[in-house]
Amino acid sequence: MSRTPAPFQKITLPNGMTYEQPTGLFINNEFIQASNGKTKPVINPATEEVIANISAGSAEDVEYAVQCASHAFEDTEWATQDPKKRARVLFKLADLVEENLELMSAIESYDNGKTLALSRGDVGLVVNCLRDAASYADKINGRTIDSGDGYMNFTIKQPIGICGQIIPWNFPIMMTSWKIAPALAMGNVSILKPASATPLNALFLANLCKKAGVPAGVVNIVPGSGREVGNAITQNPKIRKVAFTGSTVVGKSIAVDAASTNLKNTTLELGGKSAHLVFDDADIAKTVPNLISGIFMNAGQICSCGSRIYVQEGIYDKLMAAFKIAVENIKVGDPFDESNYQGAIDNKEQFETILKYIEIGKEEGAKILTGGKRIGNKGFFIEPTIFYDVKEDMRVVKEEIFGPVVTVSKFSTLEEGIKMANASEFGLGGGIETTNVSTAIKAAKMLQTGTVWINTYNDFDSRVPFGGVKQSGYGKEMGSEVYNYYTETKAIRIKL
Ligand code: NAD
Ligand code: MN
């Protein structure tokens, strides 16, 4: 079957930079149109204008990607070569991203609505993630097990095969690298579906993959809807692993589909409603910026956001006064205006969800300390919002809002604070503000969550593993841990 090439579109970014945006699906190292010719408009959330029309894949396109990926995995040396060769490709890719850091940051802000400073941080993490994966490519090895006379045993680590990778819109390029880098380092091949709201940078990266020498079929990027492309990935019988980042609701249905078709290896990075605890002895001047980055960074669209703040009663009044002033000073607006801290909400649907939750909070009787409204009438901007006087069973306290909205509750003892923090079905992030090392470590051990930040928040490093417990999912990304989820351990037992 012949595939129709898809054009590149010249785009001028709001900061004046220009570039050629691939508009097609990236399969077998070519940009092609969807088999049914469909495209979907990509919206600039700061202006609500259409940026580009990007091919929207179908189940048939996923099938084609699987054929190409399967060929690359089974019939080429990609998976079996000296891993140092794969490392070289990943190092090259990291260099190319680094050379394009300013451009890719601008693309990210244009597509997602986050501020340029944040995008630069994200793309910096992409570079680190790729270099880490390159460094690990030949360092993940099995072990020898001497079981005494008559036998010798050893294990080897082998790639899983075709990995289906599905990501959300809040960190489009960072999530792409978190998925692709470890998969490739371990010799797998990938079919990645970006969120349909934010496909631009993944396609730009695809072009860099080709330049870096990633062979055809090893990386395939198939934008499209969750229902069409997402389902085709999770249900495909030749795909052996699914790595998903997104909401808990969708994650559960993916786990079911992945298991019922061919029992795929599955890792899930899902939602959160993380607690950020402030103890009486916290340093207020240092705590306030942490509370802000905990919930208002990326306009609150971070799975690990500290969206429930718990303040010990002795410090409550002083802290809240300082927090209110600082939040009212947050500048919200144009992602390309470097004086803004908070940009736009990524898409209309999410924008409306957040505003709906603000109404729900009011109806439930929560009080607003500051914020609570849309800003302007063009673009998806929302005021940083603090709810206080909340009850722990309110929906705004229980459910993930995924926006610049935080609830504040009071606690008296450490035990009570931890109990309130743990009364959630989620378990992704968590924060502790204290100057007492015993309190810090005690509380960190007691929090039922995958990550705890002490005197910092939403503070990521590619060497530190990240992932959830409870209904925030299973599996880890980054660190040395991620490679466990992209390899199979084979045991070999020899009778002497
Ligand atoms: P979402 O679950 O709606 O979508 C995520 C991805 O899954 C998208 O690409 C979507 O198209 C696809 N999808 C949707 N339905 C599907 C289906 N039935 N089968 C296969 N794929 C399908 O989430 P979102 O709104 O894009 O992102 C926000 C959510 O992601 C929040 O809940 C947030 O907490 C979570 N998140 C988690 C992490 C983490 O690391 N734990 C990181 C970022 C975001
Ligand atoms: Mn967009």
Image: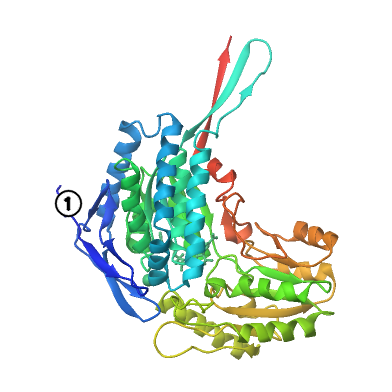
How many C-alpha atoms fall within 10 Å of the one at disc 1: few (<14), some, or many (≥20)?
few
Q: Which of 41 and 60 is in front in this view?
A: 41
Look at the numbered disc 1 and say if its residue's Cβ is closer than 8 Å to ligand 1: no
Split into quadrants, the picture shows ligand 2 in the one at bottom left
In the rendered image, residue 481, in percent from the top left (x then y), is placed at: 59, 44
In the rendered image, residue 101, in percent from the top left (x then y), is placed at: 43, 59
User: Can residue 238 be seen in the rendering of this structure?
Assistant: yes
In the rendered image, residue 85, in percent from the top left (x then y), is placed at: 41, 33
- Residue at 59% across / 58% down in the picture? 460
Q: Mark 1 points at which residue?
A: 3
User: Can residue 187 be seen in the rendering of this structure?
Assistant: no
Q: Nearer the viewer, residue 166 or 424?
A: 166
Q: Nearer the viewer, residue 355 or 217?
A: 217
At label 1, the amino acid type is: Arg
Q: Nearer the viewer, residue 286 or 74?
A: 286
Left or right placement of residue 78 versus residue 63 in this view: right
- Residue at 61% across / 73% down in the picture? 295
- The local secondary structure at tag 1 comes to loop
Left or right placement of residue 56 versus residue 400 in this view: left
In the rendered image, residue 128, in percent from the top left (x then y), is placed at: 52, 51
